[in-house]
Image (spheres, rainbow, N blue to C red):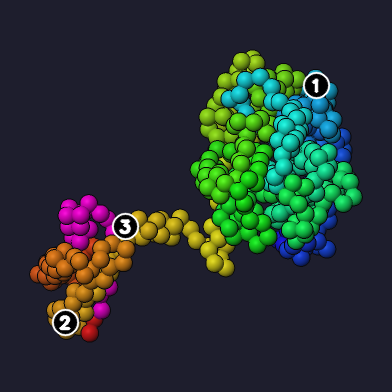
Amino acid sequence: MREVNCPIHGTAMTNGLIRLKLEEHRLADKVKLVTHKPGDVVKAGCFSVEFIHVNHSIADAVAFAIRTPVGTVVFTGDFKIDPTAKDGMIDLARFGELGKQGVLALLSDSTNVERNGYTPSENLVAESLDRQFRNCDQRIIVTTFASNMHRIQSILNTAQRYGRKVAVTGRSMENVLKVAQELGYLKVKAGTIVDLAAIKSIPKNKLVIVSTGSQGENMSALYRMAFNTHRQVEITAGDRIIISASAIPGNEKAISKIINELYRKGADVVYEKSEGLHVSGHACQEELKIIHGLLKPRFFLPLHGEQRHLQIHSKLAQQMGMNPKNIFIGQIGSVFEFTGKTCKLKGTVTAGKVFVDGSGVGDVGSVVLRDRKHLAEDGMIVVCVNLSAEDGSVITGPDIITRGFIYVKESEELMNALRDVVSEAIDRCQRKHIRDWSAMKAAIKNDLSGYLYKTTKRNPMILPVISEV
């Protein structure tokens, strides 16, 4: 937003969280936030965008119906179908109306496409939390996704029911709680939430701490508690730790590390696999089928999943009667061009990770990253040689410096052999009357590389340095 002067359109919860970020970066006075409700339509040139209410694990989640000159594109965002949702059931009637009017393309969430049936209601988690709080005479620490407003409300309700005070730790959790209370999404009795600094004056059996860190993040509150770096909370034997979240693929090892450390400290750890303390915010197969059945799109682009999820979602769409020729699976950065009757892949845009290195953002490219990887895995050898400016003979050297390859003091025999290889490469160049430094460096590099791989099966980075005296 420092570079783009335009308004941001979003629902109340979304804009509340964005406002905090803008304030953090001193941009709040420069950016216009426009708040919408489901049913609102935003004009954008020859396009218009309609907000449609959906169920998800955060309040104010919406899908978009994007009307274009060639047809309507529906983007579901993250969603599930929950008839018992606190903020009302997903607006299936609106999806049905759009389907009758005609949908050019559907872009749909694929996260839970591998799961049969329907995603369970959030109400089940409230029941599981009640079981964990009931008859517990120890301190309770609950970690969950900071954005999961309904889960946090269940935790607050359960704490109030059992006469416990609630303290919050973790920056994102504190921010979400602040915005949700301001907007009235969280109903909290006065005196229930206490400052974290006051927890030592509260009996442990009357305290709940709500924390970030459900995915094992290194700087999260739960991680710092587990590894004794949290300033205000120290895990003690008997603490009940409730992890109310499931592992996002790829985070299993980090979460397991924290759980093991919590057990090592004598804590009672309860997590989703054994106690039903989490339900997903994403649709399972039968819910996805309902959306496909209501919208009946001409084209389909599965989104938000790994390659296996996208392929399985494609097959599910085919089961719903879609022509496989009208289903397109893109990569991150793929550009698709639609007409009223066709969809084609039209190139790519730059996408993916942006590397932050010191004060530089995005200025380190793939070549530098490749070199760093090479250095990290194989180390480096620098060859220094001084040659005579008159006849090209060797005055001093070759000297060989290594970093991250071998310990020189214990590898004298190999170092001597490497000097011999370099000397032979220089002699060969002189016999051929080669005085071009680039050619000499290439000869040294090739000979050394071949010798090292043959004798050590390793391939360090080799940097020849030639000076003329």
**Is 242 part of what is drawn in magenta?**
no
Compared across the picture, whether 38 is left or right of 286 comes to: right
Q: Are there few (<14), some (14-19), or many (20+) residues within 10 Å of tag 1?
A: some
Q: CA distance from mark 1 to mark 2?
A: 85 Å
Residue at 57% across, 68% down: 359
Amino acid, disc 2: Ile
In percent of width and height, residue 94 lies at 83, 26
Q: Of label 1 and label 3, which has the lower sequence position?
A: 1
Q: Of label 1 and label 2, which has the lower sequence position?
A: 1
Q: CA distance from mark 2 to mark 3?
A: 30 Å
Q: Are there few (<14), some (14-19), or many (20+) residues within 10 Å of tag 2?
A: some
Residue topped by disc 3? 378
Compared across the picture, whether 315 is left or right of 145 comes to: left
Q: What element does badge 2 sit on?
A: strand
Mark 2 in CB contact with mark 3 (< 8 angstroms): no
Mark 1 in CB contact with mark 2 (< 8 angstroms): no
Classify the position of the N terminus by image quarter.
bottom right
Place residue 443 in its image quadrant. bottom left
Residue topped by disc 1? 96
Above or below, 154 relative to 202: above
Q: Of label 2 and label 3, which has the lower sequence position?
A: 3
Front-most of residues 468 and 89: 89
